[in-house]
Image (cartoon, helix red, strand yellow):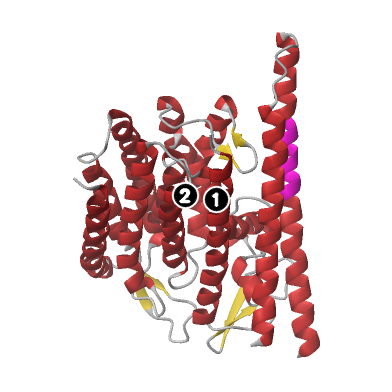
Amino acid sequence: MNDMLIYSAVFLATLIASLILTPLTAKIMRRIGKVGTDIHKASRPEIPESVGLAYILVFLAALVASLLFAPDELTKNRIGIMVLIMSLVIAVGLYDDFMTLSAILKPGILVLISLPIVIFQYADPKPVLPFVGPVRITIVYWAVAVFVVAITSNASNMLDVLNGSMSGTSILIGITAFVASFIVPLTASQQFIARYASLALIGSLVGFWWFNRYPAKVFAGDTGSLGTGAAIGLIAIYGKLEFVLIVALLVHIMNSFSILSSIGGLKERREIRSRPTIVKDGNIHASKDPKAPITLVRLLVAARPKTEREIVNDIYIQVGFSCILAIITAFLIRGVTP
Amino acid sequence: MISKLSQLKSMHSIIFSVWLMLLGLCGIIGGMIVHIDTSQNYFFQIASAVFKVFASFVLILVWLVIWFHLMKMTLIYEMNDSSLSS
């Protein structure tokens, strides 16, 4: 079958499935009492949580279906590892949503879950760096690869603070991965994974974002945010877009890195004494406390208080800017790829 | 509107500087890794590989520290700016 037809079909199928399943999952979560307070609204409404389960299962189903169209055995093996890791990440996300995992245990488990990447070694350990070209870092590559899913999952989780902030920015990153797959020279297997998986992710995320955007009717929960981050990390590794997606994720990395640095490592929410922002009269204000964590939202409201909608739009602009830099990086990589 | 634009500009400046540093970093690290002196003995090759990984690690740490300080400085600047103008 024509590749573009498969890609269009996967996008439409994931979008429609996500649009149908998201409200259904929200109803179930509300019925079982899995709701959270939207603290940034004056009325503090109760919103169904962990609804990200719907779209992340849609993405997982699309990955399983891709085994029917995969061009070769290697691609099937790579997708098999992606399915395995995604399933485990969803299980961890669900456990964290319903039972709560400690701040140190969660990234540790995510690193353990990523071990199949290193054990089976189906990825290509020769990343292409801008200005340099392909580099053989066979030992270091696997040592770093094992942390990729943990880093991207937590970065995505830490940006899931406002209505539509995680889902909207992840759509932008998915689009960047799809566009970059046409710029960076890739093998047939890497091309298939980069295009198919990124479109499946975009489709399922757009369906979810429709309900998660301001004012949110659903929350993704850790199931959704950890799963989304893991999907991006796996596309980076098996679609060979590592460096491009690092640049696209600069805002996410910036947010999580500055939070971790300013609070002095992985800590429980209750251990953080000072909040980075304060909600007053429907506006979000930056905390003046020097001990408060430095977060992206605190930076964005440092000059003046803003509404939630304004901040989310600002985050989209920042991530959009880093995605443009990622596309420029893709052209730089293309220039040095033999 | 002007304050909003200037604030977004400062965030863009951080992302742009961090991106430029990242490109420079990968140029330096990549340049180091690509060159392997095979005329030297095996022990020397292993030792230089370990040194290269260590040096790359230090460079990445320096990059992260600069990045964090850029954000901290921007936060202090934006907050001072807002308290001066209010």
Q: What secondary structure predominates along the stretch shown in magenta?
A: helix
Q: Are marks 2 and 1 in contact (CB under 8 Å)?
A: yes
Q: Is residue B58 magenta?
A: yes
A304 over A118 or under it: above or below: below
Question: Which image quarter: residue A19?
Answer: bottom left
Query: Foreground: B71 or B19?
Result: B19
Task: Please provide percent x and percent y for residue A336.
Answer: 58, 40
Q: Is residue A2 left or right of residue A288?
A: left
Q: Which residues are the magenta region?
A: B54-63
Q: Quadrant of the C terminus of chain B?
A: bottom right
For marks 2 and 1 on the same chain, the one whose residue lies earlier in the sequence: 2
Which residue is found at the position 47% from the left and 86% from the top? Answer: A42
Q: Which residue is mark 1?
A: A331
Which residue is found at the position 65% from the left and 67% from the top? Answer: B12
B1 over A176 or under it: above or below: below
The amino acid at mark 2 is Ile
Give the letter of the chain under mark 1.
A
The amino acid at mark 1 is Phe
Q: Find numbered disc 2 in the image and state the secondary structure of the residue it sits on.
A: helix
Q: Find numbered disc 1 in the image and state the secondary structure of the residue it sits on.
A: helix
Q: Residue furthest top?
A: B41
Which residue is found at the position 35% from the left and 66% from the top? Answer: A49
Task: Please provide percent x and percent y for residue B80.
Answer: 79, 79
Give the letter of the chain under mark 2.
A
Q: Quadrant of the N terminus of chain B?
A: bottom right
Q: Which residue is mark 2?
A: A183
